[in-house]
Every structure is written in structure tokens, then in C-alpha cells.
Image (cartoon, rainbow, N blue to C red):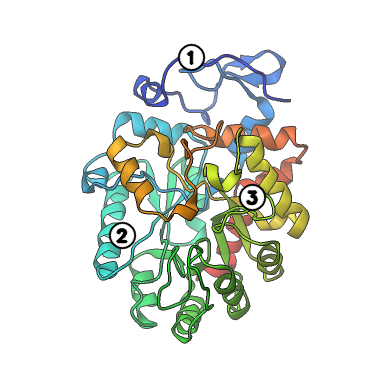
Amino acid sequence: MTLEKTSRPNRTRRRLLQAGVAGALTTGLPMINLGSYQAFADSDKRYSARAVKLVERSVVIDMLGPLKIDFRPEAYAGRISEADEKAFRACGITAFHNAIGTGGPTAVEDTLDFIAGWQGFAARNSHLFLLVNSVDDLDRAKAQRKIAVITGVQNAEHFRNAADVKRFYHLGQRCAQLTYNSQNLLGSGSTERVDGGISDFGVEIINAMNETGMLIDVSHSGDRTTLDAIELSPRPIAITHSNCRALNNHPRLKTDEAIRKLAAKGGVMGITGVRMFVRDREPTNIDNIVDHIDHVAKLAGIEHVGIGTDSDLQGYDDMPADQLKMLRESYKASYAFREKIDTDGFDHPRKIFDLTEALIRRGYSDDNITAVLGGNFRRLLAATWK
């Protein structure tokens, strides 16, 4: 079945959340004609029976999904709000790779604060969240209808030596980007003018990550650094959240060469919904996200593409104005921010259902959709984590 067009209530996403949403993945959803579901009490929008069942049966992994994009310590203090809990329960996503970028002179302290703060938040709200230690925890979260939280960091500046990899692994970290956008001691970021590739120290960290069982991520790394990491790592690595430069000439995106070589080593690439990474002009909508999934599938195989939204459930455009301004100002002009950061149709807590509908419209089989939603990343994590 395909998505039926219906009008949306004239309310903002935050007001919808405050009004409360019904769980999409509970039994007894009201059946609408032609096999579609009015799956959420706050909206007349309908999803096909096929889309709802696909999300329900899949271990859906957002391989870059911060639990909340909020720079204030109070964001992870105390108990989760009723509205936020309802949003998580209705989102259809099984696991979030909760990661931010740290760096600079206080990288170690900031990373420790991040890990302690968000793991504490998950533990205080264990009725909803399940901290991930192994791949089995992803399946356990799905069975228990909880939200699995994978702890990661979008940089590796907190690794002062190779032994630090194991230390942070024991603290719960399961994934690390080698670099963010800038140069560090391991390699170059995507917005650096010159990319010198992986350094000798970077080789030590790559070896330590493989030995420890921590997933290597090169989403923000420069072209040479990305290719070096793929070649140097004996195990497959990830591009958890990026898109295809062949479709959109942006420095943060990945070349066809990198995608092919990543796939040849067994890696997986997560496609993001950040607007300027999806398309360089308007309109920019959810079908343009599927264009990138199509490109990776045709270039390297369906088993090498997944999802890494690079946003929380609300999206960037709903952030408080002062925090959004601070975020925009922290990036170079080459990031090419536009008026909106979120992609149309992929900017709300139930976006995974809309993406599933878009994949159905594009002609993907059930097995292929399940692989994209999370099966491919689950396989990669099983092959990487110890």
C-alpha cells in the first residue's frame, strides 16, 4: 500500500508532543480503509499497514541520533518528561547512537561529562532506555519495547594514547569518529584545506580500536583520511551519517570511491537527513533522502546502506533560538547552512515511518527495507564489537 495524502492539523510539532501521542507499535491500532492505519491519536495522517508492520518487525537503528540536541547540563538531569517519553515510544526507532563532538584542550573532561551525564540519564529512566553493551542488547531492547542507547563520540581527541581506547570502552563507549571537521592528531577533518591522511598516531588508535572492539567511524573525516582508515583497518568500519557527493557537492559528503571501498571491506554507510547534506537547492524533501539510499545501493549493494539521521526526534529547527544560533556559528562557511536545517517530511518524531513509506513508493522489497532500517548496521556491529 502507498501513503494516503491527508491534511495535517495546524499545530507545531512541540504542541503535538505536549498534547501526547499514541504508541505506534502497540497492538490494536485502529484500522482505516484500504489497509492503512491512523497510527497516532494526535494526527489524521495515515500510514500503510505494510509500513507499520515493517517498522514493528525491524530492529531500527539510527546510527547517529542524539537523544536530545541541547547544550545545557539540565538536558540530562532528572527524569524524562511525559511528552518526551511518549515521543520515544511512538518513534519506531529501536536504537539511537547517542554521540556528540568533543575536542580541544578539555576533550577528555568534556567526553567524560558527556558519557556520565547521558548514561546517568538513561539509567535514571531505565523503564524506557537500555544502555547497550553488546549486539544482544539491541535485540533485548526490541523485545522489551525499550530504547537502546549506544554511546559514541564524534571525535577521537580524548584518546591521548592507545590505552585510552580500552579505558573508554570500559566506560561504555562503543563507537568513535577518528576526526571531526578539523585536523587532529589522528588525521584531517572534512572542512580542512589540506588532508594529510591518517598519521602514525592514528594508525595506533585504529589498531587499538580493532583490538578492543570499538567501531571506527569516518563520517566527518576528509577524503584522504577516510580512504586511509578503510584501508588500514582489518575490520570493517562505518560512515554512520553522511551522504553521496555524486548527488550533492558538499565537503562533508563521501565520494563514490570511498563508498565502494567501504563496502568492499564490509562497512555500512548511514544516510542523513540534514538538509544541506541532502540537496543543494529547494525543494529538499524525504524523497531526496531516498535518492542517496538508491545511489549507495546501486553503487555498492543494498547491504551497505543504513540510516544515521544526525538529529534528535524534534530536529534542529525546533531548537531554542539562542542554541540554534550558537550551533550555526560553530561551523565554517563551507557547511552552507540554509534557512532550514531539517529536511521536509523528515523533521518530526515519526520520521522513520515516513521514510519507510518513501522506500515502499520507490519499490524496495520488505527484506531490503528491513536491512536499510537497521539490519545492515546490526550486522556490522556484530562483526566489530567484542
Q: Earlier in the sequence, mark 3 or mark 2?
A: 2
- On screen, residue 302 versus residue 233, left or right, reads right
- Please provide percent x and percent y for residue 42: 46, 18
Question: Mark 3 = which residue?
Answer: 248
If you read the primary sequence from the N terminus, does the residue marked by circle 1 or circle 3 appear first?
A: 1
Residue 309: x and y, percent?
52, 46
Is residue 346 shown above or below 42?
Answer: below
Q: Which residue is painted at 44% across and 34% down in the image?
A: 89
Q: Quadrant of residue 114?
A: bottom left
The answer to whether marks 1 and 2 mark residues whose Cβ atoms lie closer than 8 Å is: no
Residue type highlighted by circle 2? Ile
Q: Are marks 3 and 2 in contact (CB under 8 Å)?
A: no
Foreground mark, 3 or 2? 3
> Is label 1 in a helix, a strand or a loop?
loop
Q: Residues within 10 Å of mark 1 (few under 14, many from 20)?
A: few
State the SS at label 3. Answer: loop
Between marks 1 and 3 in the image, the one whose residue lies nearer the viewer:
3
Q: Viewed as shown, does residue 280 lie left or right of 84?
A: right
Which residue lies under the disc numbered 2? 115
Write the residue at 70% across / 62% down.
Answer: 256
Q: Could you say where residue 189 lies in the image, as x and y percent from the top left?
A: 48, 67
Distance from disc 1 to disc 2, alpha carbons, whole Å, reads 38 Å
Q: Quadrant of residue 164?
A: bottom left
Q: Amino acid at mark 1?
A: Pro
Q: Residue at x 30, y 52 (%)?
A: 118
Mark 1 and mark 2 lie on one chain; the one further toward the N terminus is 1
Does residue 33 sit above or below 21 in this rendering? above
**Image quarter in which the N terminus is found:** top right
Can you tell which mark lies on residue 101?
Answer: none
The CA span between labels 3 and 2 is: 34 Å
- The residue to which callout 1 is attached is 9
In the rendered image, the vertical position of residue 21 relative to residue 57, given as above or below:
above
